[in-house]
Amino acid sequence: MRTPLNPLGILLGHLLPAAILAFLFADLLGVVRPLLEPEHIRLWWIYAACLATATLLSTAYALMLLRTKKPVHFLYGVLVFLVYVPLLFTFMDQFRGLLPWELPRWMMPEDAELYAIRFLSIPMAHALFVLVTASLPEGERGKPLRDMLIAGSIPLACYLFVQVIEPWRWDIDFERHVWVVLFIVLVVAFLFFLFRGVAAMVRRRGRGSEVLGWIMRILVALVFPLLGLGFNNGLLGTSREVQGVFGDLSHWGFYVIAVLNAAVVLWPSSDKPRVRMLQFVLRGIGFSYVLYFFLLFLPFLPLSIVAIIAIGIGFLLLAPVLLFLVQGTQLLQDVRFLMDQRSRSSIALILLGSLAVLPGIITLKYLYHRNVLHAALDHVYHADLFADPSDPVGAQALQQVLDQVEGNKARSWPRRHTPFLTPYYNRIVLDNLTLGQEKLADLRAIFLDEPRPNNWARVWSQGQSEVVLDTATVKSGFDTQQQAWRTWVDLRMTNNGEGQGEYVTTFDLPNGAWISDEYLMITGERVPGILAEKKAAEWVYRQIVNVRRDPSITRYVAPGRVQLRVFPFAVGETREAGFEVLHKEPIALLLDSSSVLLGDTLRAAPGEPITTADGSTTYIPSALKNELPLVRRTASVHLIVDGSETQRGERDRVIQRIEGFIAHRDLDPNTVHVSIADAYVHTFAWSEDGADRFRHHAGHGGFFSDRAIRRIIVEACAHPGPETPLIILVPSQPMDSVASYGTWLDDLADIAQCLPEGDTFLVLGDWQLPTRRTFHAPEQQLNNEPADLHQPPVRAWPDASSPIAYLRDDGKAGIVVDPDLVGEQAPVRERWWPDALALEGRWRRHQLRPNGGTAAWRDLVRGSFQAQVMTPVTAWMCLENDAQRNALLKKQRETLNADAALDIDDETITSMSEPGLLWLLVPMLVVFVLLRRKG
C-alpha cells in the first residue's frame, strides 16, 4: 500500500491536528467565555460541530479501511477539500464574530487568529497527497513535463488576467465571491499538477529522467532552501519590512544542515546494504529538518501562486513541501530495499532514532541552557548563604543563555523569534515564563561583570493622583474563640482631577496583623477579593489597567508596608472599597492623612507572649515588649570590598583606606572581618596577610556585594548574640557612581529589617570618613559629620542576663522566630490568628534560609491560600468579571509551576503561542506504528 493512501495517514493528518486545534481553542475559551454573547457562543458551537463531524467521519472511514486493509480512495481527497476549504474560509471570515474586537487582547494568545490556518492546512495537505498518489497508479510512468507545464501556466494566466481583464470587471459582492472560489480552485489545481509532476519525475527511470531528476533534486534540496534562508535573513538585499518575515532563521546551523541534507539527497542510492543503511540513517536525520520547514511553510502554500505572480519567489515557499515529497520518497525506497536485509521492527526503530537525532540535539542543548540558567538562579536567589559553591557557574555559558533569553524577549523587527523553537526553548529553559530586565541585568552584573544602570527603587511608583480619600470607617469584632480582632476598614474615595485617575495608598501594618479579606464596589455590587500569587496578580492588574477596566490590588511593598490600588476613577467619581484586618491587639492605621483605630482599647490587650504550637514563632505584645530591658550590644566591624577584576587597579587605594580607618579607630585587625565580594564571597579576619589576600585575589564576575551583606545580616538575625554587625562598604569606585555599591537584589532592604538596631550601614569613602546610610535608600546620606561606631540600644528577650533574641525599641509588638526549629505543619484554618502567626514564622525562616528554593516558596503560597491571609508572596485582588478571574488563575498556574526566581515581566506570555517541537515528534511515532503494522 502506497504510504499517502495508508488509512493511518488520516489519523495523523486529520484526527491529530483537529484534536490539537480543539485543545487550543478550548484553552482560550476557558478564559474569555464569560465575555462572549450568546450569539458568539452559538457560532462557536456551529463550527465545533462542523469540525467534530468532519473529524469523526474521517476517523470512522480510516478505522473501516484499516479493518478491511484497503487504501484511501481518490474521492476522499476531493471531499476533504469540499468540506475544509469552505469551513476554513467561513471561519476566518467570521472570526470577529467568534472573538470580537471588544475582548481584551491580553487574555488571548497573540496568534490565535492563525490556529485554524496552521492546523486545518494539514488535513488539506494530506488530501492533496492522496489526490496526487491516487492519480498515479502503481507502475505508471506519468507525464511530469506536461504536469509541470500546466502548473506553470496557472500563475501565468493569473498574471495576464490581473493585467488585462481585472481593470474592466464589475465591483459587485457576487462577483467577489466568484473570484474567491475561482482563486481557491486555481491554487488547488496549481499545487496538484506541481506535486504530481514532481512525484512522477521521482518515480521515472531512464537516462533522460535521471538528468531531470538530478536537476530537480539540486533545485529542491540545495538551491531553493539556501535562497529561501538568504531571502528571509536579508542576505539577498531583502528590505527590512520583508526580512525575518518567517521568523529568525539566521542561525548558522540552518545553513549547515541544509547543505549536509542536500548532499544526502543528491547521493545516489547504493545497492550495497551497508551503504544503503548509512544513507537511510542520514536521510532520516535530515528528514526531521525537512519536516520542520514543511510544517512551517504549509499554511503559506496558498500564497505561493500570489508570490510567483507578484515577485517571483513563490517557489521558495514550495521548496519545503517539494523536498518533503522527494526525500520522503527516498526514505520509502530505502525501507523497501532494506526490508530484505532486516526485520521491519529494526528498520522502524532505526528510522525513529534517526528522526529523533536533531530534535534530541536541540533538546539536549536546551536542557543544558536550563541547567546553566537555573544554577545561576539558585546561586543568586536560592543558595545556602554559608556554603561555597561546589560548581561555580560558567560565565561564558551563562552569557550565551542570557543572550538567547534576551533575544527571545525582543519585540523589534526583524523578528528574533525562531518558529516552533522559541516557544520550545521558553518551555524547557524558562518554564514558559521569562526573566525581567532587572534580573537579566543582575545576572549579567554578577557573573559577567557588566555595568547596570540602577540597583534600587524597584517598586511601582505611586505617581501623581488626584484621587483622594474622603472617609475611612472601621467596624471591629472580637472573636472570643481565637482571642483576636477582625476589623473591616471601609474606604470612600473621590477623583478630584480633570482626567481618569487611580487611587493609591500605602500604610504600615504592625506585627501580628494581616489582611484577611477585601472587597470593591463595581457598578453598585460588592465584589469580594481573590487571594492570588503575587506575581500573577501584579501582571493581571497591569494588563487590566492598560485597558482601563475595574481592578483593585493589595500587596506588600516592604516588610510591614502594604499598598492598596484601585482603578479606574472617572472625573468626579466616588467609589468604595475595603479590607479586613486580622489582629491580636488594638492597632492604629494611618491611611493618607486619616488615622483609624482598629479594635477597642477598653478590652485588655494580651500581656503574655504567644507561641505557636511547634514552638518556632513567638508573638510579643507591645505592652510586654516595652517592659523588656534595654541593652547596647558591641559593634562587630564587617568590611565589604570589591573583588572583581575590573577594579583590580583600585585595590591599593582601598587597602590604604582600610588600614587608615583601622588605625584611626584604634581597632584590632584580628577583630575586623573583611569580605571580598565578586560573584562569590571570601571572608577572613584582617590581619597581616589580609592586604595581600585582597591584593592578589583572582576575581570571578562582578561586585555582588548583596551576598556578603546578606550573609552577615542572616547570621546576626539567625543567631543573635552580644555583638551586632556594623556593615561598612568600602567601594572601589567614586561614591557618585551607583556601581560603587555593587549589585543588590530586590529584597535586601527587606532582609535588613530583621536587624534590631536598624537597617543602616556605613560607607567608607576617601579620607577614612564613614557616612551612614540605609538599605532602603542607600543613595541618601544620613549624617554630615563622620559617623561613629556605636549602635542604638535594643530590647532583650526574655531578659538581659540570658537573651535569646533582641527586638527593636519602637514601642510596637514584636515577633521572634527560631530559624533552626521547624516543626510539623498542622492543618491551616481560614482567618485563624494562631495559624497566621505560624505562617508568618515560616515566611521569616524562608527569608533567612532561602536554600529551600521554589518548593519552599510554593509551600508558603499554599499556606497563604489555606489561611486566607495575605503574605509577601500573595496579594488580594478584586476583579470585574469571571474572564479576568479565569485569566488570573491561568497565569497563577504558570507561575506556580515555574521556578520562583523567574518573572512574568510586562510581556504577554501564553501557554502555547505556537506548537512546540513536541508536535514534530508525533509523526515519528506514527511512522513507527505504520512500519510495525506492515509486519
Image (cartoon, helix red, strand yellow):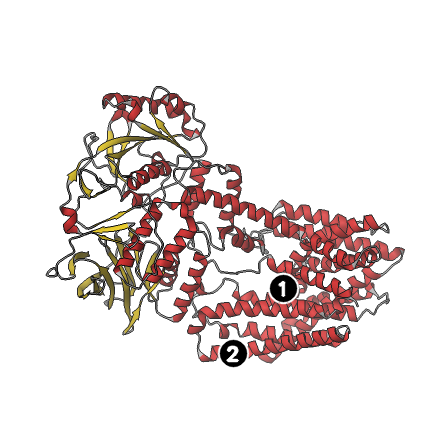
Among the two numbered marks 1 and 2 on one chain, the one whose residue lies closer to the N terminus = 2
Q: Residue at x 48, y 36 (%)?
A: 390
Percent across and percent down for residue 227 are: 68, 51
- Furthest residue toward left: 602
- In the rendered structure, which amino acid carries the disc numbered 2? Leu
Residue closest to the eye, 450 or 935:
935
Does residue 91 appear to the left or right of 715 in the view shown?
right
- In the rendered structure, which amino acid carries the disc numbered 1? Pro
Label 2: element kind: helix
Q: Quadrant of the C terminus?
A: bottom right
Percent across and percent down for residue 109 are: 49, 63
Rendered position, 703 above or below 693: below
Rendered position, 866 above or below 416: below
Return the residue at label 1: 299
Does residue 913 appear to the left or right of 745 in the view shown?
right
Percent across and percent down for residue 344 are: 78, 59
Does any portion of residue 77 appear in the rendered image?
Answer: yes
Percent across and percent down for residue 518 are: 28, 65
Give me the disc on residue 43.
2
Q: How far apart in space, not on screen, are marks 1 and 2 (Cα)?
A: 24 Å
